Amino acid sequence: MAGYAGSSPNGAGAMLRHIRDGRARTHAELVALTGLSRSTVAQRVDSLLTRRLVVPASPGASRGGRPPKTFAFNRDAGVVLAADLGATHSRVAVTDLAGDVLEEAREDIPIASGPEVVLDWLEHELDGLLEGSGRSREDVQGVGVGVPGPVEFKSGTPVAPPIMPGWDGYGVAAHLHERYGATVLVDNDVNIMALGEYWSRWRDTPHLLFVKVGTGIGCGIITDGRIHRGAQGAAGDIGHIHVPDHDEVICRCGNLGCLEAVAGGGAMAARLTELGVPADNSRDVVRHVRDGRPEAMRLVRQAGRELGGVLATAVNFFNPGVIVIGGDIAHADEHLLAGVREVVYRRSTALATRSIRIARSTLDDRAGVIGAAVMVIEAVLAPDAVDLAIASATS
Ligand SMILES: [Zn+2]
């Protein structure tokens, strides 16, 4: 899109960015920010007003047909559909263009039912939520979906996802684009959770790691406020980093001594069962911790230390401002975080840890659906995308 004539660092899309970020509310402020002439700024703002992406903000400002004195981003210029599909349950939502949830639902549906069944169900759910929010498909600016497996982001296609039979290579984005005719973005669930956490609580901290500790362990990376996916979309796959002194443990990936095989919820459940405390999954582990079982508390604390060892390396390498810990095991009171903090603060360099925060997720399972919406909003309201939409509407 670099060669596209209507897309410029000072186009209408860039004006919208200044207004959305709260840097400008008037023509004069946009002139000062951009160095453009007042008439050029007025023309760009008019094109945003025409598309209702901005609206007059001061009462009575439009009297006499004169241009409004101040204006604001119109979060109601459209809606976004968002879904966070999990292994057994899913969250779906309709949000406004600021990422605030208008309608939402949480339903049980096994992802193993396959893409046709799950996506038909999803369409039905989303249409119901749209109706509940008083909106229609015409208002949909985009659809964001998170899935519990690796995704080739460019095509919106899951790639060899271990717990999603039937989804390998299925064009999820293409399927939904055909139904809604809008931008559709599909990503790994940990990535969208990271973005949801960043957007909701940590927007003043543009370098963030989000670690999900459930049955497995995964990490979403936010750098400069954006998801870092890496060359193949595999960035943040910390569950399969080798940890020292555990080569007796075979991981489901076939390697020995992976972090997930030592410190994941599935591994802890198996270990607890061996110790005579029956546990089937990560939620059972948490229940035992909350019931005060010493074996469970010790295991979770030790898992926190193992995770902390890997994160200490990540801290030295990436220098994040905050590490947010989520997933089922994060509910095991403070034991997991205490183990993580113990090792990260001891092992990382003084400079990297000087102001780092290590916090538990407060959004819990809403992080994914919020992040899915934000991913879409940031794409459809990106300056280039806005300039392109305005050009194609006026040509
Ligand atoms: Zn592994």
Image: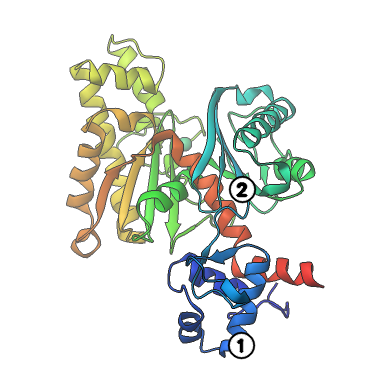
Left or right: 279 as drawn, with respect to 227: left
Q: Residue furthest right?
A: 395
Q: Which residue type carries mark 2? A: Val
- Distance, label 1 to label 2, CA atoms, is 31 Å
Cβ of mark 1 under 8 A from ligand 1 = no
Does dot 1 land on a helix, a strand or a loop? helix
Q: Position of residue 271 (x, y in %)?
A: 33, 19
Q: In this orientation, does residue 166 appear?
A: no
Label number found at residue 111? none
Q: Which quarter of the rendering shows the C terminus? A: bottom right
Q: Which residue type carries mark 1? A: Ser
Q: Quadrant of residue 256?
A: top left
**Residue drawn at (58%, 79%), measured in percent from left and top?**
9
Badge 2 is on which residue?
79
Q: Nearer the viewer, residue 234 or 331?
A: 331
Rendering colour mode? rainbow
Q: Position of residue 175 (x, y in %)?
A: 76, 40
Q: Position of residue 355 (x, y in %)?
A: 21, 60
Closer to the eye: label 1 or 2: 1
Badge 1 is on which residue?
39
**Residue drawn at (59%, 78%), measured in percent from left and top?**
66
Q: Nearer the viewer, residue 25 or 57?
A: 57
